[in-house]
Amino acid sequence: MKATVHFDTLYNAGEVDKRIFGGFAEHLGRCIYEGMYDPGNPLSDSNGFRIDVLDAIKKLRMPIMRYPGGNFVSSYDWKDGIGPRENRPAHPDFAWKSIEPNTFGTDEFMKWCELANTTPMMAINLGTKGAEEAAALLEYCNMPTGTYWADRRAENGHPQPYGVKVWCLGNEMDGPWQAGHVPAEEYARRADQAGKIMRGLDDTIELVACGSSGRGMATYLDYDRITLEYCWDLVSYVSAHRYSSNHRGDTAWFLAEGVEIDRVIEDYAGLFAYVRGLKKSDKQVYLSFDEWNVWYKNMEMDGKWTQAPHLLEEVYNLEDALVVAQYLNAFIRRADVVKVACFAQVVNVIALLLTRQDGILAQTTYYPVQLMAEHTNGKSLTPVVKCPTYAAGERSEIPVLDVSATLTEEGELAVFVVNRSQTESVSLEIAFQDAVVESVIGVETLSGSDPKAVNSWENPHNVIPAQGSAALTNGNAILEIPALGFTAFRGKISRK
Ligand code: AHR
């Protein structure tokens, strides 16, 4: 098959916010305990942090990390997780029916972020708590010493404020499963009350209002609209979540996920424009896609009142990795709308990485995230793709290629391509209206013949990227994208 992607350097969606490569760590299963934090393990440092996990996360260049949940946060008391460990209480966790020992809390997370070269994105509990607790946490994290909670922080070893910039006003408050779930009208008031006090204490922070936890929710977009109309002046972002599923066992259909992801972003772009119009406002509100991934195989959510149970330990395959690449392609293409996104989650729980006592395993999904985080730089070029379509079941005829691209001022080009065809490779020509591709810097491809291929402890390098090549002809680049393939192309262009 042959295909072309056309670009014009003037036709772009603006600078890509690197925070779209964020992550998410929740007190859930073995994400924190045995994942990030494993004191006594020879692979851990003196803080108890797994060094192999830190190293693998650093390679992903995640600029922001959402914490501590997720559903967990909606019945969490952050005060249980500070101070001397021997005084910290263990509690049952409503969300995951587990025991939370609280030996890892806010200060440990801040230290972990520092070592992982990332920044914290804190979620507050708007389920069972409210404005007062949120204000206390903000004081603990961001205020100079001299007041009660800031002084507690200093006592706990950190006199300098942490300066947490981005704060989530609760989690998935639209979901009936959420502790303290309420209709949008009530959530909006809770969010407004908490957010006003928080920004009153520190007006440098940015707030994220809960939106919908999925497109399938009966209140999809309406929950978001009601909240946004009430909190418009206060918030910088609305949060969207999406988990993709191949529950039909239909790879062709599943690989068309990118089309749905585009739709969700488009829905929010429309919502933001609508409320801005309603308010006659000049302000821009953006999307924080702060939970996204594939998740449908391991639905074990009951921790049976144990500590660090094996929950949601999904094993990812090649087709999942191709869907993950499409999420990031969609975020890059809509750089004008999506400013923050958090891969859910980073370790052990629906994760990029799995740990055992003696090591770490990078899942298939790790590699597109790593390649795209490393090579996305500059503005998001708008791709005009000419390619064949394929039959994607109920999703009908879908383009075989899913493409995004970025370009720096210095002319460094990155083009990310997913070939959804399961049988045919695509010869792709990259052409510019106003520039020539003058050199190829690198080509890396993740592919295979079996969409269900996984990395395992026995065969950890079964699905990993391979180096490829591209030809230059008449100022264009030509490269071969294999069937079931994801390719990251890098080149240098010069303007005509
Ligand atoms: O990431 C797992 C869970 O999925 C989160 O706790 C929740 O926010 C979402 O429903």
Image (cartoon, grey):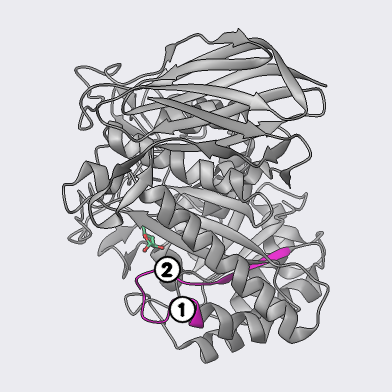
Q: How many marks?
A: 2
Task: Specify whether residue 215 is painted magenta.
Answer: yes
Q: CA distance from mark 1 to mark 2?
A: 15 Å
Q: Which corner quadrant holds the N terminus?
A: top left
Measuring from the top left, give residue 230's x and y in whole percent: 66, 87
Residue located at (76% from left, 34% from top): 9
Question: Mark 1–mark 2 contact, CB under 8 Å?
Answer: no
Which-is-in-front pick, marks 1 and 2? 2
* Prevalent SS, magenta region: loop
Give the answer, above or below, for where 209 lies relative to 312.
below
At label 1, which amino acid type do we have? Gly
User: What segment is highlighted magenta in the picture?
Assistant: 206-222
Can you identify the residue that label 2 sits on?
213
Which mark sits nearer the N-terminus, 1 or 2? 1
Q: Position of residue 422 (x, y in %)?
A: 26, 31
Can residue 26 be seen? no
Element type where label 1 sits in the image? loop
Residue 202, disc: none
| Element type at mark 2 | loop
- Foreground: 74 or 2? 2
Which of the labelled discs sits on residue 127, or is there none?
1
Q: Residue at x 25, y 65 (%)?
A: 97
Q: Position of residue 363 (x, y in %)?
A: 33, 30
Q: Residue at x 54, y 60 (%)?
A: 265
